[in-house]
């Protein structure tokens, strides 16, 4: 599954109503939970967004066209491939149907200034206590999404999985983290993800706990574990940061970094450590310490991918690779920005 664009420091910016449960719950990272008979001043407490019951002018069932809605901003602009509307634990109070719209707005508009909404999921029936996955055919770039529910009710979680399309003008000529998920990078392959997903290592912010990194099982055979990151674009890396925060009895003994400009894998494809590519040493095998941020000056060459190897196994909280786009990298990023307009 592609990254959730709402998890990249996105936010829920407006809602028609949130009487029973707050709109911000929709983009929580954790799976929804439910504790029966946990009542607050406004009724049973739900881990999601829930609106009051709509009524027609005469107090009867509302008009079928009336509905509640919520607007969320992506943490980074991107192309949405799938929307998830999860009604977990909402049974007698789930919406009858939903639709999803999206738009792109540069800068920092208020919710009232958003316009040119495009429908990316048509009105579709929903069922209670169910995870609904809706594929999206559009390949336009968006910055905001609007979930409409008919006529009212509760939704536990909203996800918008897709690929980040960073604004080239914000990266041109700058040194930035070329491995960051929010800048368009992604983890495309790894040897093991038993305890936690490798994408955590390039996610925004500081790690909150051990589970907020990438941790492999204990390796019992010869060899080592690894992951491959597709960079934001072809770049030259100057500083590498390998963070083992929270990993104390389970950090790697050693790590190394290699770069390549010949990897052809896409996200989610398997590979024997990208062995078909030509790899160059970026950081030789070095010893690491538990619960420590390690920083290294490196002399990179133009590359599109980086392979992190850990010896023999263990956990890494964050990988940051600071560098600059090459002219080819900037050209490719600009082309993608234009193609998704």
Image (cartoon, rainbow, N blue to C red):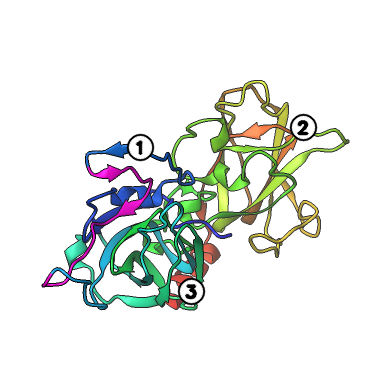
The answer to whether any part of residue 301 appears in the image is: yes
Is label 2 or label 1 in front? Answer: 1
53 or 27, which lies in front? 53
Q: The magenta stretch spans which residues?
A: 42-58
Residue 124 spot, x, y in % from top left: 42, 75
Which residue is most to the right?
222
Q: Cβ–Cβ below 8 Å for labels 3 and 2?
A: no
* SS class, disc 2: loop
Q: Write down the residue under mark 2.
A: 218
Identified at 67% across, 21% down, the residue is 249
Q: Write down the residue under mark 1.
A: 38
Q: Residue 167 sits in which quadrant?
A: bottom left
Q: Earlier in the sequence, mark 1 or mark 3?
A: 1
In the image, residue 161 lies in the stretch drawn in magenta: no
Q: Write down the residue under mark 3.
A: 136
In which quadrant of the rendered image does the N terminus lie? bottom right
Q: CA distance from mark 1 to mark 3?
A: 37 Å
Residue 49 spot, x, y in % from top left: 32, 53
Q: Is residue 185 above or below residue 257?
A: below
Asked whether, in this view, residue 221 is left or right of residue 148, the answer is right
Q: Residue 109 sits in which quadrant?
A: bottom left
- The crowding category of the residue bearing disc 2, from other C-alpha atoms within 10 Å (few below 14, some 14 to 19, many at least 20), is few
Identified at 61% across, 39% down, the residue is 298
In the image, residue 57 lies in the stretch drawn in magenta: yes
Q: Earlier in the sequence, mark 3 or mark 2?
A: 3
* SS class, disc 3: loop
Q: How many marks?
A: 3
Q: Earlier in the sequence, mark 2 or mark 1?
A: 1
Which residue is most to the left?
58
Q: Residue 41 sits in which quadrant?
A: top left
Q: Is residue 264 above or below residue 43?
A: below
Asked whether, in this view, residue 44 is left or right of residue 199, the answer is left
């Amino acid at each position: 599954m592609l990254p959730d664009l709402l998890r990249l420091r996105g936010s829920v910016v407006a809602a028609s109503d949130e009487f029973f449960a707050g709109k911000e719950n929709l983009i929580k990272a954790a799976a929804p939970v439910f504790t029966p008979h946990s009542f607050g001043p406004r009724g049973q407490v739900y881990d999601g967004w829930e609106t009051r019951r709509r009524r027609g002018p005469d107090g009867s069932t509302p008009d079928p066209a009336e509905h509640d809605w919520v607007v969320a901003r992506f943490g980074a602009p991107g192309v949405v491939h799938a929307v998830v509307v999860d009604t977990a634990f909402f049974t007698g109070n789930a919406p009858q149907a939903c639709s999803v719209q999206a738009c792109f707005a540069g800068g920092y508009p208020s919710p009232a200034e958003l316009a040119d909404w495009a429908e990316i999921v048509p009105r579709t029936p929903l069922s209670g206590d169910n995870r609904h996955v809706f594929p999206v055919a559009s390949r336009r770039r968006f910055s905001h999404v609007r979930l409409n529910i008919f006529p009212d009710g509760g939704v536990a979680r909203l996800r918008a999985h897709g690929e980040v399309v960073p604004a080239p003008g914000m990266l041109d000529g700058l040194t930035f983290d070329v491995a960051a998920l929010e800048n368009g990078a992604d983890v495309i392959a790894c040897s093991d993800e038993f305890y936690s997903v490798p994408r955590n290592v390039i996610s925004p912010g500081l790690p909150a706990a051990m589970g907020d990194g990438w941790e492999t099982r204990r390796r019992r055979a010869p060899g080592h574990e690894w992951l491959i990151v597709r960079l934001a674009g072809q770049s030259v890396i100057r500083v590498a940061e390998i963070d083992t925060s929270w990993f104390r009895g389970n950090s790697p003994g050693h790590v190394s970094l290699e770069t390549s400009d010949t990897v052809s894998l896409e996200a989610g494809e398997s590979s024997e450590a990208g062995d078909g590519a030509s790899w160059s040493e970026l950081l030789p095998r070095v010893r690491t310490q538990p619960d420590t941020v390690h920083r290294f000056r490196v002399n990179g060459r133009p590359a599109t991918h980086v392979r992190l190897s850990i010896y023999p196994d263990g956990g890494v909280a964050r990988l940051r690779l600071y560098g600059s786009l090459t002219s080819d990298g900037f050209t490719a990023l600009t082309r993608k920005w234009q193609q998704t307009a």
